[in-house]
Each structure stands twice: as structure tokens, then as C-alpha cells.
Amino acid sequence: MADQPSDTREAAPRPAIVGAGTMGRNIAVASAVGGQPVTLFDIDEDAVRDAESEIGSTVGTLTDRGVADVTDADDVRDRVAYTTDLAAAVGDAPLIIEAVTEDRETKAAVYEEIERHASASATLATNTSSLSITELASSLSRPERFCGTHWFHPAHIVPVVEVVYGDRTADETVDTAAAFLESIGKDPVVVERDIPGFIANRIQSAMAHEAWALLESGVASAEDIDRAVKGTFGFRLPTLGVLEKGDHSGLDVHHKVLSELLGEIDRGTSPAAVLTELVDEGRHGVKAERGVYDWSETDSERLTAERDQRLLDQLEVYRAARGPPDAPDNPDSRDSSDEPES
């Protein structure tokens, strides 16, 4: 694809994204929408071809919603170059984001090839939700130039990306990754210790585990559990984070409620039996047309499109709650000491 420079970022070496699967494609979209030209690589020509088609459609949706910094979708699409030549993709890339399958051996093999072609000064970031950054870096000749960037699906919409230190990651590496994310309008959150699940997935998994326990014990239906989450604390989360909510309620109240409830929360160390049964029955969710819910009468593409439109609505709420970039994170200084914990 021909590139037509429009700003200094067009003329500079492009960051590279290695892996044109779902996450790689959406990271490329996020970069292009944020004004940053990138190169998307995959060894599979069909994957590259499919990625170009899907990215074109996604960019059109985002520009129609006014998410992109220009209204011409073609200008945004042209910021993504496609290749099956790894050396061409990473040779002069200052930042390389690896987004291949979530498998330690596969990633290690990809890193060996990347190091063969990339500059010694390049920053390499892995997109992983569960693998240890320290362990992934163990096969690298330059582990100090390696960090985690945990993007959340759909990566072109969800604003936060976790930037994760490994034991040997240099501060400069994290700074480089965070600066790139900020430049494309993302909100980097630095994880200073390499722990399983990082921040968000640990909190999300704790919530999911309790939700499955409630379903299994017959406390409420799946529909009512989901409605309770979406319409209560889930409704507040774009405005009030978990710890911030404690301050608003009063930490004395927060401490009292935790003291009363923690002993009652499910402490199992394995997935709930009801979840295991669904998986064993092949009820894997939307992709299988059945999971907790019956999706057999639903068009999956339409369902995804509707989900993304709702998430774009939430993105506007999230950005409004945070205020302009130079505003404090907690602009509401009103006394809220009398708020109930719930």
C-alpha cells in the first residue's frame, strides 16, 4: 500500500505489529485511528489479506462515529502497511508489538526471528494477558528492551493498556511503550511487578469466580446476576474506580463491609462446576451459539457490531469522566463522607 506522508509521524520509521489475528488487527486500527502509521506483519498471506479487509471496515465504522482524528476513512486506512516479510516490518521499527497466539513456545520462536532482523535499540512489547513477562524475556539477548503491553478486547476501543515490567525490564523501555500508547490516545497503566493476570484480569477473575458461585448456588438467575453487575457498581466504574469508591463511601464503612463479607465469599481454587459442565458440553458461548445463554437465533456479526457501538458510547462516558488530559483524575472534591458503601 502506498504511503502519503501527512505529518512527521508519516516520515519516521513505523512501529511494527507482529501477528495479524484479532488482537494484532485491532492494535493496528488503534494506532491508525490515533494518527500513528504502523506496519502489520503476518507469515500467512491469507491472514494479511483478511486483516486488510477487516481493518478497512472497522476504520469506516470509527470515522463515522467521529472517533478518528480525521473524517476521511481512506486517510486512516492508509496509515497501515501490510507485509509477509518480517525483516521489512521490523528492520528499522523503533517499537515492535508482538501479538501472536498466547503460547510461550510460539512467542519464543517469534522473538528469535525478530531479534535476527530488528535494531538493537528497538523496544519489543508482547501482548499477553497471562504469561510471565520475566519468563518470556529469558530467551532474549536484550531482556532490558522487553516489556508487556496487555491490550483489552476490543483493543481499538478499550482505552486502558497495561504496561508490564519484567524482572530485567529497563525504565526506558516502559517509558517508550507508555509514550507510544499516549500518542495514539490510549491510557497506559504501569504494572510494576510481574504477577499472573497483572491488575485488571486478577480483579475481573475474582468477580467472575464469585458470579459463577452465585449462579451455581441458585442465588439468582444468570440474567439477574448480569443485570445486577451492569446496573450497580458496573454502572459507576467509568466514573469511580474500586479504591476511589472506598474513599467516597468512607474507608471506615468500606473496612466494616469487607470485614463482614470476606468470610462469605466463595474461596474455591477451581472454576465452578456449572462452568466446567458447560465447557464439557461444548457450550462455549457465542462462537458455539450456546453458552450461559442461547445465541442460536442471533447473527454473530450483528451482535459484535452492536456490542462495539455500545462500547463506543461507554468510551465517550469514560473520557468525559476523566476530563481533559491536564485535568486531575479526581475532579470532584465534594465531601462524600456520608455516602453508603453500596
Image (cartoon, rainbow, N blue to C red):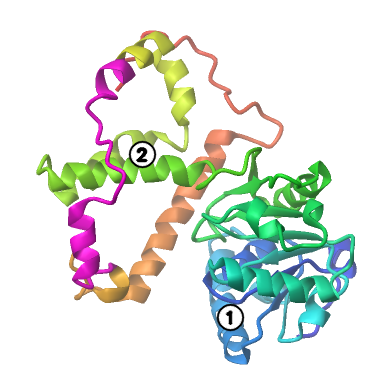
Q: Is residue 266 above or below residue 281?
A: above
Q: Nearer the viewer, residue 40 or 55?
A: 40
Q: Which residue carries the number 1 mark?
A: 51
Callout 1 secondary element: helix
Query: Picture quarter containing residue 213?
Result: top left
How far across and down, in percent of the image, does residue 128 sit? 57, 58
Magenta residues? 257-285
Q: Position of residue 88 (x, y in %)?
A: 82, 81
Q: Residue 41 colored magenta? A: no
Residue 237: numbered disc: none
Residue 327: name its quadrant.
top right
Residue at mark 2 to residue at mark 1: CA–CA distance: 33 Å
Which quadrant is home to the C terminus? top left
The residue at the point 63 percent across, 39 percent down is 193
Q: Which residue is mark 2?
A: 234
Q: Position of residue 161 (x, y in %)?
A: 60, 50
Is 284 inside the magenta-drawn segment? yes
Task: Count residues near mark 1 (Cα–Cα under 10 Å), then give few for <14, some for 14-19, many for 20+.
Answer: many
Q: Is residue 53 left or right of residue 252?
A: right
Residue furthest to the left in view is 218
Total number of numbered discs in the rendering: 2
| Left or right of 236, for residue 214 | left
Closer to the camera, 323 or 83?
A: 83
Q: Say which residue appears at 29% left-offset and 69% top-offset.
A: 286
